[in-house]
């Protein structure tokens, strides 16, 4: 399985960005850990982090993967364009949020992706990405 790991705006600064909320682990470390675990099971990780919505949608439109793990960052709360792109991907989507969005600001209580991901991992820190991968492998 080729698994596309997508990270939206501001997630390229994981490790430095508000570590009290998002932890000290960097995105390259997370992707490295995913790649290692995926390889053990014979799967491949493709990855993209972008701060640009259209770039993310263009990547989803390439359809060169079998499943998606996505942390859409703030787009979660307002991007119908990302929702539509994920719905049109026709693959299993797993959503990850490092922080527990349900315990944060009101605007984070809105999730416009609701109903699209087959599974969500929320508030488990960076290891939530590994949980997402494990879920995808088990669901296959
Ligand atoms: C986030 C939560 C979002 O509300 C926020 O905008 C992010 C990160 C998380 O991983 O906890 O950028 O998706």
Image: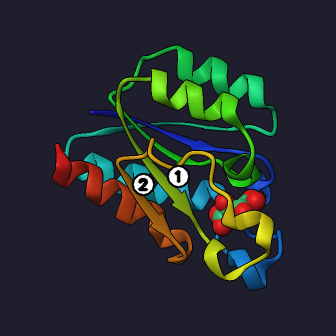
Left or right: where does residue 136 sit relative to residue 88? Answer: left
Q: What element carries label 2?
A: helix
Q: Do the residues labelled 1 and 2 touch (CB within 8 Å)?
A: yes
Determine which residue is flagged by label 2: 34
Residue 48, how many percent across, how many down? 62, 36
- Colour mapping used in the image: rainbow
* Within-10-Å neighbours for mark 2: few <14, some 14–19, many 20+: many
Residue 115 visible, this orientation: yes
- Position of residue 46 relative to residue 15, above or below, is above
Residue occupying image coordinates x 73% and y 65%: 108
- Residues 88 and 68: in front is 88
Left or right: where does residue 8 sit relative to residue 30? Answer: right
Determine which residue is flagged by label 1: 31
Find residue 14 and report its image quarter.
bottom right
Residue 80, how many percent across, how many down? 68, 34
- Position of residue 27 relative to residue 115, above or below, is below
């Amino acid at each position: 399985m080729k698994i596309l790991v997508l990270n939206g705006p501001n997630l390229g600064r994981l490790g430095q960005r508000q570590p009290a909320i998002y932890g000290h682990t960097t995105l390259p470390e997370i992707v490295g850990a995913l790649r290692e675990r995926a390889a053990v099971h014979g799967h491949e990780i493709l990855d993209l982090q972008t701060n640009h919505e259209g770039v993310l949608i263009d990547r989803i439109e390439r359809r060169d993967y079998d499943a998606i793990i996505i942390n859409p960052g703030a787009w979660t709360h307002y991007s119908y364009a990302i929702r539509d792109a994920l719905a049109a991907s026709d693959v299993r989507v797993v959503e990850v949020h490092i922080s527990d969005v349900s315990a944060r600001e009101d605007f984070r209580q809105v999730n416009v992706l609701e109903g699209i991901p087959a599974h969500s991992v929320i508030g488990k820190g960076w290891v939530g990405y590994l949980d997402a991968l494990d879920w995808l492998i088990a669901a296959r």
